Image (spheres, grey):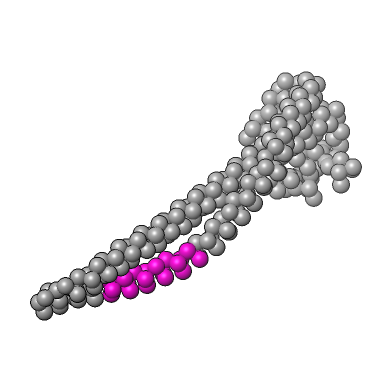
């Protein structure tokens, strides 16, 4: 294989690695954002459950106060019964007492429902607190690692890109421009392999004469379909 082909193949290896690492520069921040989103969602859920529980307890307290208020009225009205002289007033006051007692009974039922809801809310609160703690710990355990990994990958990309650029200095400018155009327009694949007499980039069959030229490794052979540069796979990569 001529030296230019060897250099192009080495450049492609580095561009392959750069492509993989650039994917990581997108995936790693997404992982970090996902951890932060999980914690934010858990905190919002915890806040909501706390609010619902507070409202429940507040409602219970208000209904208990209302029962006490009604009970005080009932006792007051019962005392007044002793001094009432007409049947009309007696019946009216008795009716009011009966109404308040019925109302207290209804409120008691409402409190029971609220107490049952309270039990559920306290279970939800415990679960929400547990989830908030879990997501907070998960973020704490991974945030710095992911940040460091992101910076490390960025540094590696710079280093590998510098290696590729040094290799690029060793080939003619017209060949370098051709390689760069293929990298840009062909999914970061400028140099591909002869795979069972077909282009591994697009699958197009390679004519026998071109197969011979690829095997000789003297000329730069391009796929007649996609234009990528085709070489034989090195023995150490088989």
Percent of width and height locating residue 173: 72, 20
x%, y% of residue 161?
Answer: 74, 27
Judge left or right: residue 151 versus residue 131: right
Q: Position of residue 81 (x, y in %)?
A: 19, 74
Task: Examine the rendered structure and indicate whether residue 68 appears above or below residue 237.
Answer: below
- Asked where in the image residue 181 lies, by quadrant, the reply is top right
| Quarter-of-image position of residue 231 | top right
Residue at (85%, 35%) from the top-left corner?
217
Asked if the magenta segment contains residue 173, the reply would be: no
Q: Quadrant of the N terminus?
A: top right
Q: Position of residue 228 (x, y in %)?
A: 70, 37
Residue 61 or residue 113, whichever sits in front: 61
> In this image, 234 relative to 102: left or right?
right
Q: Residue at x 63, y 39 (%)?
A: 29
Q: Is 21 or 94 nearer to us in this picture?
A: 94
Q: Residue at x 68, y 33 (%)?
A: 183
> What secondary structure predominates along the stretch shown in magenta?
helix
Which residue occupies 81% across, 32% down? Answer: 10
Magenta stretch holds residue 111: yes
Query: Relative to 118, is 187 above or below?
Result: above
Is residue 224 something one can see in this rendering?
no
Segment tinted magenta in the rendering: 99-119
Q: How many circles with numbers are drawn on the protein?
A: 0
Q: Nearer the viewer, residue 195 or 189?
A: 189
Residue 154 visible in the picture: yes
Residue extending furthest toward the front? 83
């Amino acid at each position: 294989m001529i030296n230019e082909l060897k250099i192009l193949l080495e450049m492609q290896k580095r561009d392959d690695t750069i492509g993989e690492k650039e994917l990581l520069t997108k995936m790693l921040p997404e992982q970090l954002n996902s951890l932060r989103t999980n914690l934010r969602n858990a905190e919002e859920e915890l806040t909501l459950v706390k609010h619902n529980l507070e409202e429940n307890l507040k409602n219970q307290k208000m209904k208990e106060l209302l029962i006490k208020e009604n009970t005080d009225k009932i006792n007051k009205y019962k005392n007044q019964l002793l001094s009432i002289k007409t049947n009309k007033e007696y019946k009216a006051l008795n009716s009011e007492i009966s109404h308040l007692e019925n109302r207290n009974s209804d409120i008691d039922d409402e409190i029971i429902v609220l107490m049952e809801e309270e039990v559920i809310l306290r279970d939800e609160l415990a679960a929400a607190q547990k989830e908030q703690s879990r997501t907070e710990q998960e973020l704490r355990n991974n945030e710095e690692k992911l940040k460091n990994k992101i910076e490390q990958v960025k540094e590696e990309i710079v280093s590998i890109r510098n290696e590729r650029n040094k290799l690029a200095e060793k080939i003619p400018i017209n060949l370098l421009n051709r390689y760069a155009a293929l990298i840009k327009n062909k999914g970061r694949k400028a140099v591909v392999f002869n795979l069972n007499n077909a282009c591994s980039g697009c699958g197009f069959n390679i004519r026998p004469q071109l197969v011979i030229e690829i095997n000789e490794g003297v000329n730069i052979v391009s796929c007649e379909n996609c234009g990528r540069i085709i070489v034989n796979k090195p023995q150490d990569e088989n």
